[in-house]
Image (cartoon, helix red, strand yellow):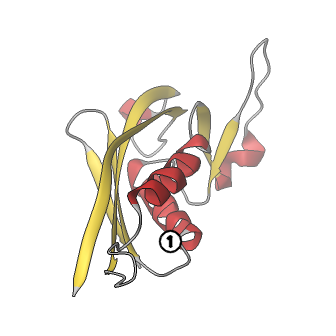
Amino acid sequence: MKVKIGIEGKAFDAAHYTLSSPSDDQIHGHTYLVSVEVEGEVDEKTGFVLDFNTLQTVVCEELRGWDHKLLIPEKDLDKITLHGPFRTDIRVVKDSFATAEFIAMEMAKSLHNKLGQKFRISVKVYEGQGKYALVEYP
């Protein structure tokens, strides 16, 4: 029997722009909230699908790679130059836009790999209150 376990409400802060949305083409930021579910069989030896501590560690590690970054789509990387008396930490999004949809897809694939490709992963990324993208992978 398949069982889902999860953690909810993990946050990271990042800035992005969305050229496909005229009202969002300016660099702006969000506090993103992320929830993750893992689906699999209960291990008879441990009583777990996956230890919550392991899931917490892996998800927090993933979010550190997104936190306080400027999210730039890979296709725009060669078009952008940042200078100033500040850090210029960027995270390249491997898709066309740095939208909640593509962020969730990238996170789901990454978590699937980090957890040994043994589980079905659901990632829900909130971009502000009440607006989210939900991805199930694979």
Q: Kindly give the residue lying farthest to the top in the view shown.
A: 85
Q: Quadrant of the N terminus?
A: bottom left
The kind of residue on which mark 1 rests is: His
* Left or right: 135 in relation to 25: left
Q: Secondary structure at mark 1?
A: helix
Is the residue 64 above or below the residue 128 in the image?
A: below
Image quadrant in which the C terminus is located:
bottom left
Residue visible at 75% across and 16% down in the picture: 86
Q: Is residue 132 above or below residue 112?
A: above
- Whether residue 102 can be seen here: no
The location of residue 66, given as percent across then percent down, is 57, 42
Foreground of the two, 25 or 127: 127
Given residues 84 and 34, the one toward you in this image is 34
Q: Nearer the viewer, residue 18 or 32?
A: 32
**Where is mark 1, residue-wise?**
112
Residue 71 horizontal/vertical position (percent): 58, 41
- Whether residue 112 is visible: yes
Q: Which is more toward the observer, 29 or 67?
A: 67
Q: Quadrant of residue 64?
A: top right
- Residue 92, position in %: x, y? 66, 49
How many C-alpha atoms fall within 10 Å of the one at disc 1: few (<14), some, or many (≥20)?
A: some
- Give the quarter of the image for residue 88: top right
Q: Residue at x 49, y 52 (%)?
A: 59
Q: Position of residue 73 (x, y in %)?
A: 60, 50
Please give the name of the residue rendered at 52% of the width and 51% of the height, measured from the top-left corner: 57
